[in-house]
Amino acid sequence: MADKNFTKEDIERVQKTFGKIINKYRIALADAIRRPLGVIPDSAVGLISDIDLQMAETRRGIFIKVTDVENPVAFIIDDLATEKQIEIIRLNAKSLNLDADEYCLEKFNCRTDVLSKTFADKLILMLQKESTPRVPSL
């Protein structure tokens, strides 16, 4: 077998592919853990995060299509609002003297940490609209 010199792009592509596979295993593992029992197997320690467990708890017993555009809760990790979106939500809410999670609960009946990217964008627009100065009508 001949030696192959791997390019930086080859290595990045492989890393990205393995990252996606590992992410799928984390999701499956989080779903497999029964949160109310509170038992996390030794093999799972360090493989999943608190958000993975919260997402599993959210998905358990709920049978909504992943593509349901009317549901603000992300049902797959890839659909979670980005850190940048959450930061923008928190900053905009703070500028209005609001708590971001309370505002999100009021508008979408969920916390910001489980919000989908689409609904994070909607929430950002809602907050920006509220912060826009109103011109009195004549």
Image (cartoon, rainbow, N blue to C red):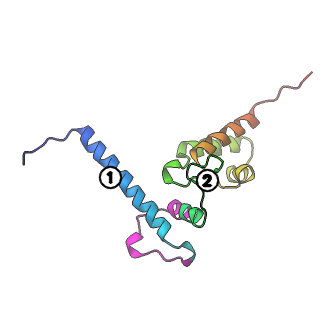
Query: Could you say which quadrant of the image residue 12 lies in?
Result: top left
Q: Which residue carries the number 1 mark?
A: 18
Q: Work out which residue is located at the far left of the displayed protein and give it.
A: 1
Q: Is residue 100 magenta?
A: no
Residue 132, labelled with which disc? none
| Residue type, mark 2 in image | Val
Q: Is residue 46 magenta?
A: yes
Residue 64 x %, y %: 60, 57
Q: Verify CB contact (< 8 Å) between mark 2 and mark 1.
A: no
In the depicted structure, whether residue 114 falls above or below residue 94: below
Please state the extent of the stretch shown in magenta in the rendering: 37-54
Residue visible at 71% across and 39% down in the picture: 126
For marks 2 and 1, the one nearer the N-term is 1
| Residue type, mark 1 in image | Phe
Q: Quadrant of the C terminus?
A: top right
Residue 39 x %, y %: 49, 77
Q: Which residue carries the number 2 mark?
A: 73
In the depicted structure, whether residue 42 falls above or below residue 114: below
